[in-house]
Image: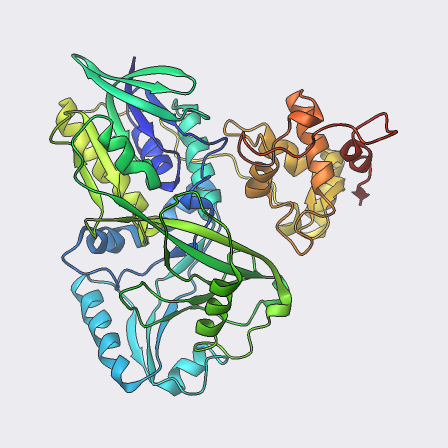
Amino acid sequence: MYDVTIVGAGIVGCFIARELSRYKLNVALLDRENDVSDGQTKANSAIVHAGYDAHVDTVMGKLNARGNPMFDQVCEELDVPLKRIGSLVLAFEDAELPTLRELYDNGRALEIPGLQILSPTETRRIEPNVVDTIKGSLYAETAGIVGPWELAIALAENAIDNGVELKLNHEVTAIAAFHDGFRISTTQGEVESRYVINAAGLYADKVNNMVAKPFFEINPKRGQYFLLDKNADGLVNTVVFQCPTKAGKGVLVSPTVHGNVIVGPDAENLENREDVRTTGNRLRFVKEMAAKSIKDIPYHYNITTFAGIRAEPSTKDFIIAESQDAKGFINVAGIKSPGLSCSPPIAEEVVKILDRIAGGLEADPEFDPRRRPLARFAELSDQEKAALVRENPRFGRIVCRCETVTEGELLDVIHRSCGARTVDGVKRRARPGTGRCQGGFCSPRVIEILARELGVDLSEVKKDSERSYILTGRTKGSSAPRAQLQGEQHATL
């Protein structure tokens, strides 16, 4: 029996797992998908919000204020990219200027540092490409950008290295309470646990209802994005927001930590929690709204569009509490934006709840907060690259030309404790397929390397989930799958 089982391995579940690995506990981390960070975490705006937006009286507001400054230490310990670039909220009409003042006053009440209301001229000094008609802006110097899936993967890896057991492809189908805890039925068998933490994201209400009375609903809301090539780098210097409305924070334009530009999202209510399609009419809407903020966005540099789904709670605020109906069952639900920014203190709050109901937790003196740094070949100097290739020639074999990713990097991310098992899993960890050609050159080689390193047939390599396939059989007249033949080609330094 486990002491604690966490249902859901998104950014929140992974933060909780890592926080619990600080203690002498037997912890399991379950997820229905083939990898961690495979739900909301892999498709969002990647913003570390400064914390002025969510109201001072909400759980979201209080936790965002706490969470923002925690990212520097966490990302340094786990070798995850983080950039403090600041943010702007633009006012386009005189009628929106009071909204800037309300956000400023709310931020001051939450003790958010570095807030300023700027004139149009001051705004253009920071962002020369904003539209000429703006009336002012709110500047927040502490806002940042991060790699959300990279952070979740790093958290999971560090948690596993400190004793947490990761169980993927374990979709929870039922939960039953018994005298000493809970029996969790999954698609891979049963798991018994004294305590359960429900961090199931879009399905948190369904998981709650397996063991307790319904008291909240998750309402899915889809947001669609453009991702522009690195040639668009410099279009904006900060995260550029629009004045918020009832529908959300509006369409943003922002750099990413890897030098791209992201534009979006819209906000569309859905019934289907799995519908991550992009649609022409909504992407046109994103373009129209973004044009209100930034002049001449170069959409000819667009390399992909994508959609993510937010878990909007009926309570309008985060739910972080032990269930009243099922003692020992803790809900961590409705973690919508700014959920990423709030994730570190959410994990701390969960540990406080567990410490209380368990009668105290014992710290593990062997906990190591650091993970082994990644080898990012493209970021090295020429001298460092040459030394690395001499040490391991596989770092001299370029797999992804767009992002300059080597075979040595792929082997590293495949063989870590939370290693990649799919093409998209490799992509999220080492970035092959994220560049201009979107995997057109490197995907066959990635498939071949995965098959070789995992000891499986090429046809067994998945794109992402267990339900996604790439190869279905051999081509006519070929003695080997076409991907294998293509995989023999690679660039060498």
Image quadrant containing the N terminus: top left
Q: Which residue is at the far right? A: 477
Can you say which quadrant of the picture contains the C terminus?
Answer: top right
Q: How many marks?
A: 0
Q: Quadrant of residue 239?
A: bottom left
State left or right for residue 46 relative to residue 439.
Answer: left
Q: What colouring style does the render use?
A: rainbow
Q: Is residue 180 left or right of residue 125?
A: left
Residue farthest toward the left in the current orientation of the protein: 324
Vertical position of residue 60 compared to residue 191: above or below? below
Instruction: From this view, report whether residue 370 is shown above or below residue 5.
Output: below
Q: Kindly tell me whether residue 454 is visible in this rendering.
A: yes
Residue at the image position 64 percent from the left and 25 percent from the top: 460
- Placement of 187 over or under 8, stated as above or below: above
- Picture coordinates of residue 434 (x, y %)? 61, 50
Indicate the position of residue 308 as horizontal and vertical percent values. 44, 50
Q: Where in the figure is residue 69, as x and y percent of width and height? A: 31, 53
Residue 125 lies in quadrant: bottom left
- Residues 219 and 154: in front is 219
In the displayed structure, does residue 483 sit left or right of residue 414?
A: right
Residue 279 horizontal/vertical position (percent): 51, 58
Residue depicted at 61% across the width and 40% down the height: 375
Camera sees residue 366? no
- Please name whichever residue, 289 or 232, is drawn nearer the observer in this view of the structure: 289
Between residues 187 and 253, which one lies in front from this camera angle? 187
